[in-house]
Amino acid sequence: MKTAVLLPVHNGARTIERAIKSLLVQTYRTWRLVLVDNNSTDDTVKIVKQLMETAGLEWTLLTCKPSGIVPALNRGLFEIMGREVDLVARLDADDAWYPHKLEKQVAFMKEHADVYVLGTQITRVDPQNFNPVPQQVKYPTDNIDIRKMLFSGNNAIAHPSVVFRPEVILRTGGYDNTYPIAEDYHLWLKAAGWFNFANLEDILVDYTVTHNPKYNPKCPQLCCISMRTALEQLH
């Protein structure tokens, strides 16, 4: 299955090498990196270029002038939707995948044609030393349990672990800037009207825990209430 790895980045020079190297050692090889540079002023692009050229791999570099994760994600998706792609995978500049991540997810998606969004378990790590932090999470694996968690106001799919079929974007319209600090959660809520979810039992991502000063813990709940209200109006 042809997989596009979507990686938006703004000034990720400190961690991008770790992320790209985790991609380069994937046991599943049918992927292409789509890097969206969101106004970086450091050596991010230079580092990625050197790593990809050394590996002898082609990749796509895009630029996104509007600042923010949502414009960058949608810029990448616009490019990806114009290609023959079976899956879209998300990677962030400060996270790292385990070597068998894509292989296990692709195998699952081949066997489960009814699943359109697939995540994995993660290890939450400290941004300074990348060691595990005390507070870890366990995501549900079953579609029904994932939906229950989503509609209770809690995210149930780790964004940098996810792969999804392009139909999810074609149906939902992509990421929405209404909730720029819960853009992934909002997308899953929109997708829930049409598609099934799953999470693997395996821990396959080191997720770097960073504090966003703009983050409001009430944002997912507000997002959930808004979406549930909209769905009720449809019926």
Image: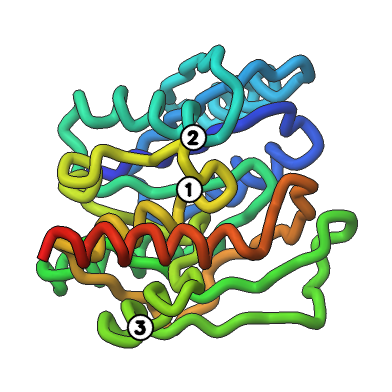
- Residue type at mark 3: give it: Lys
* Residue 174 in which image quadrant: top left
- Pointer 3 residue: 148
Sooner in the amino-acid sequence: mark 2 or mark 1: 2
Which residue is under mark 2?
Answer: 70
- Relative to 125, is 100 on the left or the right? left
Question: What is the spatial separation of the Cα atoms under label 2 and label 1, in whole angstroms?
Answer: 7 Å
Q: Position of residue 153 (x, y in %)?
A: 48, 73
Secondary structure of residue under mark 2: helix
Q: Residue 46: where, in percent of width, then height?
A: 68, 18
Contact flag, marks 3 and 1 (Cβ < 8 Å): no
Name which residue lies at 43% across and 30% down. Answer: 34
- Res 198 → quadrant: bottom left
Q: What element carries label 3?
A: helix
On screen, residue 134 above or below 78: below
Image coordinates of residue 187 in percent, x first then y, are: 36, 52
- Quarter holding the C terminus is bottom left
The color scheme shown is rainbow
Q: Which residue is drawn at 53% across and 69% down?
A: 204
Q: Is residue 121 above or below residue 62?
A: below
Q: Tell me which label, 3 or 1, sits earlier in the chain.
A: 3
**Above or below: residue 110 compared with residue 40:** below
Which residue corresponds to the image point at 55% horizontal and 64% vertical from the top-left?
Answer: 98
Give the left or right position of residue 53, taking residue 13 as reference: left
Mark identifier at residue 183? 1
Q: Distance between the residues labelled 2 and 3?
A: 25 Å
- Label 1 amino acid? Glu
Q: Which of 154 and 198 is in front in this view?
A: 154
